Image (cartoon, rainbow, N blue to C red):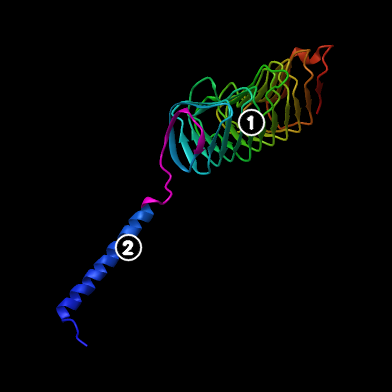
Amino acid sequence: MQTLPDTIRETIVKRLAISKWMGGLVVAVMLLAYSPVSLATDYSGTCTGTVPAGSHALVGTCTVPFGQSWTFEPGAVLAGNGWSINVSGTLNMDQADITQAFITFNADSAGTITATVFDNTSSSSSCLININDASPSFTGSNNFGTGTGTTRWMCITGSSIVDPAQPLISSNTFTVNYSQGGIDVGGTAQPTIASNSINIVGGIGVSFEDSSSGTMNLNTLTFTADTASNRSGIWVNEDASPSVTSNTLTDDVTRNDFGLVLQFSGDSSATVTGNTVNCSDADIPVRFGMGVFANASTANVSG
């Protein structure tokens, strides 16, 4: 049996090795090219489908049309840049991070927001989240308060008597900086505000106005140590008739604040019972307006 000369045999071995290496390189490049990578995306106009994990930005107003949905997957980070998200369909967020985006839920829209962080650096006098005749749910450890802005966090309102706003706001954390409040409820809205932690640096924790109602129970409102005084935990104004029960308000012993401010009219049928207001020094645990004592009032106020 003849054997190849050593020089020819070495050349063949080297070429086979190079060919094998090049083949592996091609396969590696192909795998890299087809690996799932979350690419940054700019959003504006009609916004539907899924926002994957990764960094994204609003570059204009986003609209979620009726019958459509826009879903943020865990790990999605959105820089709102002061733009708005107008929801007529469904907006869902789970474990997302939203900075400086104004969100409006229009009539009959929906959504489920869970375990999402909202960062507020705006000095606008409007609300970061507006709920108008809609009933989305904000539950499961959403965090409203990683920022220094003075915009109100949430305004819940509407005009429908037949189908009023009935959102569920439960088990979240709010940090309130603005003098007009963390959660403002007005119009005909009937929210359920339950088991939230509301830290009041300045302003009003929760207020009910107009002919709004709904329930507020088992929340903890904390006056945090700060330079501000004359803060308020819960306001009930005008014809508002909520059920405010079993809430706890803690004290900042270095400042003088108001616990419950009840300034509703004689037409109110509010129930304010079983709340615990911790106070010291010149704090005012309950401040009454004249409407509380109106002869025709059906409101119920007790310890």
For label 2, the SS is helix
Residue 182: x %, y % from top left: 60, 27
What residue is shown with label 2?
A: 24
Q: Is residue 146 above or below residue 268?
A: below
What residue is shown with label 1?
A: 136
**Depth order, front residue of 207/274:** 207
Q: Which residue is drawn at 51% across and 38% down?
A: 50
Q: Residue at x 73, y 19 (%)?
A: 162
User: In what quadrant of the picture does the N terminus appear?
Assistant: bottom left
Image-quadrant location for residue 298: top right
Q: Is residue 241 above or below residue 29?
A: above
Residue 218: in magenta span: no
Three-letter code for the amino acid on which mark 2 is drawn: Gly
CA distance for labels 2 and 1:
52 Å
Residue 259: x %, y % from top left: 69, 26
- Report the residue that reaches farthest toward the bottom: 1
Q: Residue at x 71, y 20 (%)?
A: 212
Q: Which residue is drawn at 60% across and 33% down?
A: 174
**First to last magenta residue range:** 33-50
Residue 278: x %, y % from top left: 71, 32
Q: Is residue 185 above or below residue 277?
A: above
Nearer to us of marks 2 and 1 is: 2
